[in-house]
Image (tube, rainbow, N blue to C red):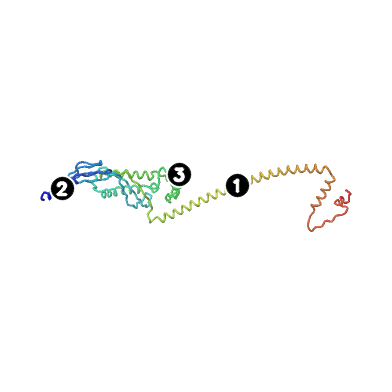
Amino acid sequence: MKLSRLIIPLLILVVLVGSSSFFIVKEGEQAIITQFGKPVGGTYKQAGIYFKIPFIQEVHLFEKRLLKWDGSPNQIPTRDKKYIWVDTTARWRIVDPLRFLQTVATYTGALSRLDDIIDSVVRDEVSSNLLVELVRSADWDPERGREAREEFSPPQMVQAGGQSKREGGEPRTVKKGRQIITRLMLKAAAALTPQYGIELVDVEIKRINYVKSVQKEVFQRMISERKRIASQYRSEGEGAKRRILGSMQKELSRIRSEAYRKAQTIRGKAEAQATIIYGEAFGQDPKFYALYKTLESYSSQPQGKSDLILSTDGEYFGYLKGVK
């Protein structure tokens, strides 16, 4: 009975010791073992089951996969004094778990360090560049991107031929563009993260927006710009309409002139042919021709209320009397 009382606690102790003597590193994880707060045994980067001294050594597991950082939107002035909200994101990974453990210890500590580093770099780059550089690419295709440029370009700028123009008309070429600026952000921030065992893989600007204090003014500028563009389109359309109508009237006059010329030619030929036919027909009986022409002249006399008084000796009655 006493032996059974000793065996049960002993088995429980063995199970506890055995379970705390092994640890599992999963795929996508890496581990560091510390003994009394000091790292021992190096880094475990391969998935598998490993042994540690129970109760003395502690296992710290870290991700090997890419992790995401999302910063808080910041209000930053650009070099041309345009106050904007800039929202950025980044991807990072832990490449030196030992240094990571020694410097920041936890993911929360790492995100705090990234907040300081990336926010500072983003603020420096935004404040040292023009707004047009932040919202556009240097390799923008002016033909394929014309509609998108007109839709999303800052209202104080008008696009033409791959360049930006200020309201006064001064051309401004995009020299860097957002892609190059974000690469500069990444380069500057990535140089500061290795001391924490972190590799910064990418930095991107998620969104750029005007601050509320100037949004109303910006919207008014956008409306004015759209009205100006619409007026320009209407003016160009009216000019094109007048050119088309002018060409149409010119072509219509030419067609009418050509048709009139052809009609007169056909009519002249027809009248000449008719004259020949009439001549041949009336030439067969000259007296009948004289009678026909006399009656024809009578029908051409004025009609209406006027009266025509003829003498019996007139030519009209000559044919009735049988004189002619």
Q: Which residue is mark 2?
A: 11
The kind of residue on which mark 2 rests is Leu
First-in-chain label (1 vs 2): 2
First-in-chain label (1 vs 3): 3
Q: Which residue is mark 1?
A: 248
Q: Residue furthest left?
A: 2
Residue 279, placed above or below residue 222: above
Q: Which residue is mark 3?
A: 144
- Judging depth in this view, the residue of 230 and 267 nearest the camera is 267
Q: Position of residue 265 (x, y in %)?
A: 71, 42
Q: Residues within 10 Å of mark 2 (few under 14, many from 20)?
A: few
The kind of residue on which mark 3 rests is Arg
Label 2: state its secondary structure.
helix
How many numbered marks are there?
A: 3
First-in-chain label (3 vs 2): 2
Marks 1 and 3, Cα distance to the nearest angstrom? 33 Å
Residue at 60% of width from left, 47% of height from top? Answer: 248
